Image (cartoon, rainbow, N blue to C red):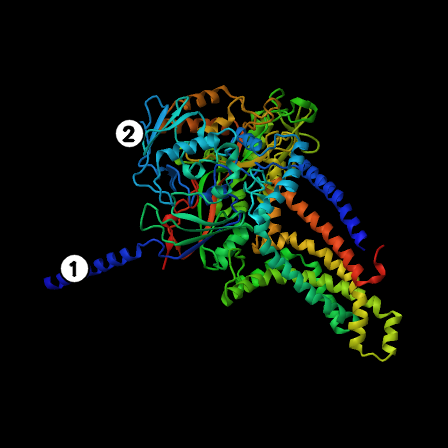
Amino acid sequence: MRIYTMRLAGLAMLAVGVLVVSAATAAERGRDGHVSIIYWQAPSILNPYLSGGTKDIEAASIVLEPLARFDASGNLTPWLAASVPTVTNGGVSADLRTVTWKLREGLRWSDGSPVTAADVAFTAEYCRDPAGGCSQLARFDDVTAVEALDDLTVRITFGVPKPYPYGPFVGATSPILQKAQFGDCKGARAPECTEANFGPVGTGPFRVTGFRPNDVISLEANPNYRDPAKPAFATVTFKGGGDAAAAGRAVLATGEFDYAWNLQLSPEVLKGMVAAGKGNVVSSFGTLVERLVVNLTDPSPKRGEARSTRAHPHPFLADRAVRKALSMAIDRKLLVEIGYGQAGRPACNVVPAPEMYASKANDDCLRQDIEGAKRLLDGAGWRPGPDGIRQKDGVRLSILYQTSTNAVRQDFQALIKQWWSDIGIETELRNIDASVFFGGDPGSPDTYQKFFADIEMYANNFEGADPESYLGAWRCGNEPRPASQWQGENMPRYCSEAYDRLLGEMAVTGEISERARLARRMNDLLVQDYVLIPLVHRGRVSAHARSLGGVRLNTWDSEIWNIADWHRVR
Amino acid sequence: MPVYTVRRVLVAVPTLLLISLILFLLLDLAPGDPTAQLPLTIPPEVKENIRRSLGLGEPIHVRYLLWLKQFFVNEPLHLLSQLTGLDLGGDRHRVISWQTRSPVVDLVIERLPQTLWVVGLSYVAGIAIGLPVGIVSARHQYGWFDQVGTFVSMVGFSVPTFFSGVLLIVVFSVELGWFPSIYDTTHRVTGWDSLLFQLRQMAMPVAVLALYNAAQISRFMRASALDNLTLDYVRTARAKGLSERKVIFVHVLRNAVGPVVTVVALGVPGIFGGAIITEQIFKVNGLGQLLITSIQASDLPTVQTLTFVFAVLIVAFNLLADLLLGILDPRIRYG
């Protein structure tokens, strides 16, 4: 018996030995050949500082990397840096004005030269050049200096205390550029460096071998990547163009591609494609919330210059009871089912995630309450008129409800119009081409900033995991108005002393759980005042071939943030 | 004839200038904003800064004159210095796309091959099918061939390519797996295998477009041949005892092909314009796809340059069609 056991143990050890050996031979860079990715929006440029488009930032993230980034659960993870600086480890100064990053040792660019703190400092200089039109300038807000202290240490100084100093060089939107390559490309010369913008030298797992703007990128494994066993793939094709349905089909139905990004398709279409059995659909939730924005000011054309400004409060939406009734009448579960399926869930908060930031105080919005809404309006003195539309003192509850042109949004408009008509509110619908609606042209009356309507609907989110600047949008005074050339982010024209006080408090609070409490409190103010009516928490849905392993969908950073770990499943 | 040609070319210059001005004004008046596609997380001040860096702060006449200079002076100089290897262009600014921050003309040159391959080949195929079908249909008017031909060309005419294209993909890519549904623009033909792959990936888009082109051309050819078949000279030819083959190919065809040549020549600029919808469906990513993505992104320099290049081609091929007619038909030569 004993001998038998020993033999068995010996066999097991032998087996383990074989496994180890085979794993060692398998762990070789480029062992899995080719992987192909399709983005239905084609990348135009590989320099995230010259483009804010998601497609460009994500394509560039294969090549360019930041000091730290967010992992799939939204946690800050050191990437090119050895660790994330905090007050506790001394990386962030006690007065919250400086943060010191230390690079990992031995990092090399794909051309073989060493990565140094000078590259980091240069990247800041590049983006902060006023003539360059840098898309990520907001990441460098309040930065006064970025200095390389030695080859591996870089210090960022802020003009004000920065309790959350992870703006510069964190996440896919703010990666490190190579000084040697972009040195002559600063300011007004930035667009002239086509070669650098199309083929940046990076530290990522792959390097560019061919770039055809708005079409396709060819990449190969970076021979100087820091982990000799990665990436598993030798080459990558990153194709762009077409539409979401075609991209989904290429992965799920025909199997021509291994990975398809952002499949905004109706739930049934997606289900039909998955049935072919060639691939899997993955989804993940970040902070994107589809919401109704209530105009607290009077958008009537008869106000002339003062239209949709705080000079004139809205004739009926200034009444909280009406706003609350609008929210109560909505069946969010049905909206999700119809519009998003697996890619959405009902939302009651404008800050839906990360978990510690998400308030639980508003969950009663999940239940549609038509009768309750009617009673509320009755109680507030809004009585049905002869045509069934409620009115008070000659003011009829008639709403102009606008959004961008998009099939799902128009479905939502139709449903919500029906529910509002059930509680005696008349709705006129309007949709505007997205490039006009979101295109801040101060000459156009149809932008979402001008908000010449009573209600508007769109989705918004915040980057990374900290909502401070996102919540700052609803600060009093940040509303679009003629004096600001209609720029500003406070679309509802909200103005609350309590809210602004909380914002001020957050600006000097460094402790994460305390910041989360403040964020929840502000979220509750916005939502319980019904100036923003959250509808759907929207996720990202992507698809990958069954044979592609290692995919971890990340909505906090670039979706393909861990492409170095992708491999072929046999 | 030479005087006529020179006069026509001279008239084309102010025409094109006027076209470029109208294009510029139309594009400028059209709503849209190059930063509209950026995520909402980018604050408005930053967007304003981006717009300024693109030169949008300048008044319209400055921007128009700048574009004229870039397109008519800097681009040809650049081309010349590339061809001759001399440095004539120096540091001059070329027309730069807002979306890619790279010279528009380079984008166009990069896109040309796949558009010419796919759209051009489908045009050639359309002509090769359309002409004989039109002649045979006319010769046997209301015969079974004519009936079938009429039916097929009606289908080709009326079924939009966004339907027939997707239908082909579903049948031949998804169900049968014969052809790829996504065109590989990086593919290089180096031998028989790669040629075969190229033919396979072109098969569906070419088929979709060829059906449409053949339908159009065969109808023109049929109508034009029918007009001639009833004329006296045909009866005379037949009375002389000429074979039917000779009557059709020598006498009728020569006379009937005139108007068709005009139609075919005027269709050629359309090839360069790409096939916006078909290119999108099969991800050919040629000039048509470049145009539509630039429009969506409000990339005005690209849209302006592309549409103007199309205008030049249309004017040029109009001229060519006129001259060609003069050669084919001595009766309409101009003083």
Residue at far bottom of view: B241
Q: Image check: A407 left or right of A301?
A: left
Q: Image check: A397 left or right of A68?
A: right
Report x, y in % for residue A491.
56, 28
| Residues at circles 1 and 2 in contact by the CB criterion of under 8 Å | no
Q: Amino acid at mark 2?
A: Asn
Residue placed most toward the observer, A200 or A418: A200
Q: Image check: A354 left or right of B156?
A: left
Image depth: mark 1 or mark 2 in front: 2
Q: Is residue A67 visible?
A: yes
Secondary structure beneath label 2: loop
Q: Amino acid at mark 1?
A: Ala
**In the depicted structure, whether residue B259 falls above or below residue A193:** below
Q: Chain of mark 2?
A: A
Tell me the tag on residue A9: 1
**Residue pictured at 58% horizontal, 26% vertical:** A480
**In the depicted structure, whether residue A249 falls above or below residue A143:** below
**In the depicted structure, whether residue B12 falls above or below residue A463:** below
Which callout, 1 or 2, points at the residue further toward the start of the chain? 1
Secondary structure beneath label 1: helix
Residue placed most toward the observer, A22 or A283: A22
- Residue B217 falls in which quadrant of the image? bottom right
Graded by Cα atoms within 10 Å as few (under 14), some (14 to 19) or many (20 or more), the crowding at tag 1 reads few
Question: Which quadrant does the C terminus of chain B fall into?
Answer: bottom right
Report x, y in % for residue A224.
35, 47
Residue placed most toward the observer, A422 or B91: B91
Tell me the tag on residue A89: 2
Question: Which quadrant does the N terminus of chain B fall into?
Answer: bottom right
Report x, y in % for residue B213.
69, 61
Q: Chain of mark 1?
A: A
